[in-house]
Amino acid sequence: MTRNILKMLSFTKSFADNKDKAKILREKHLLPAIKNGHKIVIDFTGIESTTQSFVHALISQACRKYSGIFLELVEFHGCNKYVKEMIKTVINYSMED
């Protein structure tokens, strides 16, 4: 199975807050990978903090659209405690919808 790695620090600064960039990453990388059944690693190594709106723009649509396979195909690496909490929050409310 193909596995893609999306290194967030290559696209944003150590404070990930630009939701427009997150939307581009979602459309260009995340959604196509999941649609094709490929695993994708979203690597937050070097990201010190993020906003909930950035994480929402990055993963919420994919969570809702592919709720049955999202957690099987998407992995999060290099997350500090704060980033991890943001991701969990967005996944939780996205999966509830």
Image (tube, grey):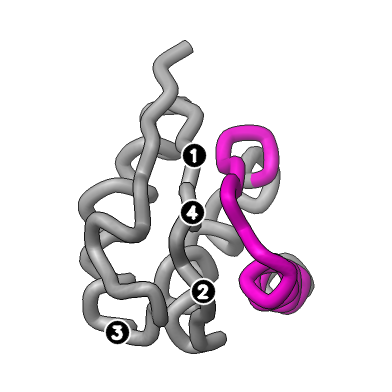
| Mark 1 in CB contact with mark 3 (< 8 angstroms) | no
Question: For numbered disc 2, what is the local secondary structure?
Answer: loop
Type of the residue with mark 3: Asn
Q: Is residue 23 left or right of residue 89?
A: left
Residue that badge 3 annotates: 18
| Mark 3 in CB contact with mark 4 (< 8 angstroms) | no
| Mark 2 in CB contact with mark 1 (< 8 angstroms) | no
Q: Residue at x 50, y 64 (%)?
A: 59
User: Mark on residue 48?
Assistant: 2
How many numbered dots are placed on residues in this image?
Answer: 4
Q: Is residue 69 left or right of residue 2?
A: right
Crowding around mark 4 (Cα neighbors within 10 Å: few <14, some 14 to 19, many 20+) is some
Depth check, mark 1 against mark 4: the one in front is 4
Residue 67's x, y, as percent? 66, 52
Type of the residue with mark 2: Glu
Camera-side residue: 35 or 80? 80
Mark 2 to mark 4 CA distance (whole Å): 8 Å
Crowding around mark 1 (Cα neighbors within 10 Å: few <14, some 14 to 19, many 20+) is some
Question: For numbered disc 3, what is the local secondary structure?
Answer: loop
Find residue 82 and report its image quarter. Answer: bottom right
Type of the residue with mark 1: Val
User: Mark on residue 41?
Assistant: 1
Type of the residue with mark 4: Thr
Earlier in the chain: of badge 3 and badge 4, it is 3
User: Mark on residue 45?
Assistant: 4
Query: Is residue 97 visible from the viewing direction of this image?
Result: no
